[in-house]
Amino acid sequence: MIYFLTVNYYSTNLVFQLINSIEKTSYVDYKLIIINNSPDDNSIDNLKTESVLIFNARTNLGFGCACNLGLKWIYNQDPQAYVWIINPDAYLIENTLDKVKLFLDSYPEVSIIGTIIYTPTGEVWFAGGHFISTTCEILNKDLLTQTDKAYVACEWVSGCSLIINCRIFSDCPLFDPAYFLYYEDFDFCKRYAKQGHLIVVTKQFGVVHQASSITDRNIFLKTKHSTYSYLLTLERYTNLLVQTIKLTRLISYAFVLIFIKPKVALGKLYGVLIYWKRCLTAIRERSTVKLL
């Protein structure tokens, strides 16, 4: 069984488009699990069918925690499931699901599969993730257009379109709840790669993504969350020197933008403030433990 998992945040029209694309390409059994991060959005209930299940969060959980809610439910139902996490502003390309089933049966060794992702105009939006550890550069690198391989191993794949082979995991794979939005896919891949799981990207099937069609509704919140998550990622995956340099550049750039793009600038500064508060809380907790 293939389970699709998507997170709704006031995007019923986009989820409807996603459902239509699944139905047009479906030759295998599937279910779509919708985690509703906008509980007052009753319009999403109109999409409920035998194949479409909706779980209402009490509040906006963020992307990773909402996905965890769905992943836990799916894993309890079927630990052998394939779970395709897909953005509500993405949709499948024609004749997709038959190719997916064949791929998953042919390459049972892969744990996490990222698909090639196109823009609505047909340009490649994502085709593999690269990471430079010395500078903590998290890059989108095209690993697919110049190869005929069924898949290419890479360091991370986009959470916009990500398939999890649950049967390889001894426990339910989960995102780190410390991330509200952005960089949770990178952290997810890095953590499970460290445990020996194979992360790959393929162009044998893909999706079309209407990038930022949801997050651009509120630039301040988008920038705040991305800044906080970026700093958290720097903390985990680079050294103190690189972290300090990048933080200094980030703050300096925010002050440059304050009169040009005030919402972006304030979002960056607020993200830094939240991160600093988190660091101070962690220091206090460690101090308390030492005293005890």
Image: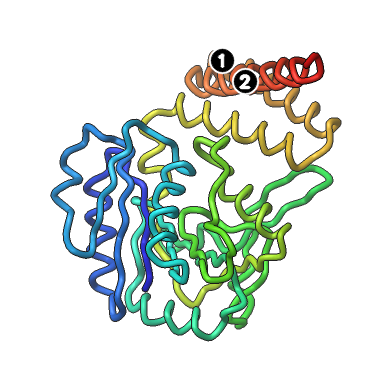
Q: What residue type is disc 1 on?
A: Ile
Count neighbours of disc 1 (C-alpha within 10 A) and say few if under 14, some if 14 to 19, many if 20 or more: some
x, y (%) of residue 29? Answer: 29, 75
Of 138 and 263, which appears nearest the observer? Answer: 138
Q: Residue at x 44, y 48 (%)?
A: 67
Of 146 and 279, which appears nearest the observer? Answer: 279
Find numbered disc 2 in the image and state the secondary structure of the residue it sits on: helix
Location of residue 170 (image quadrant): bottom right
Q: Is residue 63 above or below residue 228?
A: below
Location of residue 37 (image quadrant): top left
Find numbered disc 1 in the image and state the secondary structure of the residue it sits on: loop
Placement of the N terminus among the 4 image quadrants: bottom left
Q: Residue at x 51, y 66 (%)?
A: 166
Give the residue furthest to the front. 292
Q: How many marks?
A: 2
The answer to whether residue 128 is seen in the rendering is: yes
Task: Return the mark for residue 254.
Answer: 2
Q: Residue at x 17, y 46 (%)?
A: 45
Q: Is residue 107 left or right of residue 209?
A: right
Q: Is residue 11 left or right of residue 234?
A: left
x, y (%) of residue 25? Answer: 29, 75
Of 193 and 290, which appears nearest the observer? Answer: 290
Question: Between marks 2 and 1, how big is the CA–CA gap?
Answer: 6 Å
Task: Return the mark for residue 258.
Answer: 1
x, y (%) of residue 183? Answer: 58, 43
Q: Is residue 153 left or right of residue 91?
A: right
Q: Is residue 231 above or below residue 85?
A: above
Q: What residue type is disc 2 on?
A: Ala
Q: Is residue 288 above or below residue 41?
A: above
Task: Return the mark for residue 192.
Answer: none
